[in-house]
Amino acid sequence: MSQPRILDGKAIAAAVLEECRAEAAELKAKGITPGLAVVLVGSDPASKVYVGSKVRTCGELGLFSKKVELPEETTQEELLKVVEDLNNDPAIHGILVQSPPPKHIDEEAIVRALDPRKDVDGFHPENVAKLALEDPTGFVPCTPAGCMKILEVSGIPTSGAEAVVIGRSMIVGKPMALLLVAKNSNATVTIAHSRSKDLPGICRRADIIVAAVGRPEMVKADWVKPGAVVIDVGINRVEDASKKSGYRLTGDVAYDEVAPHCSAITPVPGGVGPMTIAMLMKNTLQAARQIGA
Ligand code: NAD
């Protein structure tokens, strides 16, 4: 079996970030400094790492960033007030409330309170509708936008392709399916989920598989049609005594056995992961452009 193309998300993300750096400089020359606010409630270690790298990337590109760290016991009302203040802050064009918040917070209500023009995660109902309407002024959720970018810059044709998206979350699966079926992509899309029957059979039809499940190495070699393209969104920690940390990261795809069947595949880590921050920066610049000074 031939070797697949390894779709290098790190390199593609680096190129996107270079475009963002140039665009940030252009906006600054017009007197607009793009600004992103990242709100973290509580002290979840993974969330802290994500927030840290978002803020750091802003700095590297010349974007203004504001990190708002709130204690675990922050109330819904207090958080809504923070969101309102950021909605009204002219230095801020993008707002992101890091997920997941503590259990007592109603995340959906927080998302609805965001000014949709600043909702750079693309989770507000207005942006969900704009995605369905194919309105380019809306914000596309960063991870599926990153998957589409990988397909696009890798020259992988989507028009007329059979695409199977495994997972129906509002963060990845559903927006991914909408992007693939949109008129500028034209794939024939199936969304599979936890109640789907004969998942291996559904996947075997696919020219493109996007796995966004959160189950380590679920997609096996005999689920994949020879020559298919596999985009692995999953990021799962599995125990590994040979690692200093005691764990390693793995995707939703059994990479070693699946790769030889594919024409192209994203690795984990180094595939979809790095694209998410890059697309967040792109969305923040879009917000700054659209809102203006
Ligand atoms: P989620 O838990 O919200 O959704 C998982 C989906 O998988 C659900 O729609 C469910 O129906 C489906 N599912 C669960 N078990 C299934 C099964 N046995 N067969 C078929 N479908 C099944 O998760 P999510 O937020 O969409 O994230 C999915 C994965 O992507 C996770 O591993 C997450 O860590 C990863 N992720 C990565 C990035 C990134 O930046 N690369 C961003 C977001 C999520």
Image: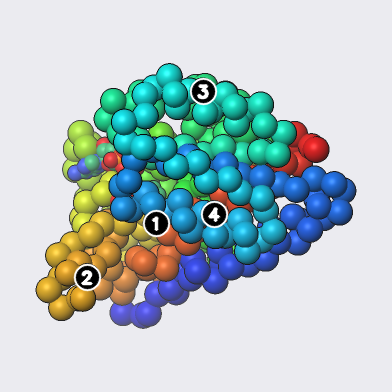
Q: Earlier in the sequence, mark 4 or mark 2?
A: 4
Q: Secondary structure at mark 1?
A: helix
Q: Earlier in the sequence, mark 4 or mark 3?
A: 4
State the residue position of label 2: 245
User: Within the image, what quadrant is residue 41 found in?
Assistant: top left
Locate residue 61, reporting x and y percent: 66, 61
Q: Is residue 34 left or right of residue 17?
A: right
Ligand 1 is located in which of the four quadrants? top left
Q: Residue furthest right?
A: 30
- Cα separation between marks 3 and 1: 25 Å
User: Within the image, what quadrant is residue 89 found in?
Assistant: top right
- Cα separation between marks 4 and 2: 24 Å
Q: Secondary structure at mark 2?
A: loop
Locate residue 43, reporting x and y percent: 32, 46
State the residue position of label 3: 81
| Mark 4 sits near ligand 1, with its Cβ under 8 Å away | no
State the residue position of label 1: 49
- Cα separation between marks 4 and 1: 10 Å
State the residue position of label 4: 55
Locate residue 290, reporting x and y percent: 75, 36
Q: Earlier in the sequence, mark 4 or mark 1?
A: 1
Q: Residue at x 14, y 65 (%)?
A: 239
Q: Is residue 186 visible?
A: no
Which three-letter amino acid code belongs to the residue tagged 4?
A: Val
- Cα separation between marks 4 and 3: 22 Å
Name the front one of labels 4 and 3.
3
Placement of 181 over or under 21, stated as above or below = above
Q: Quadrant of the N terminus?
A: bottom left
- Cα separation between marks 1 and 2: 15 Å
Q: Secondary structure at mark 4?
A: helix
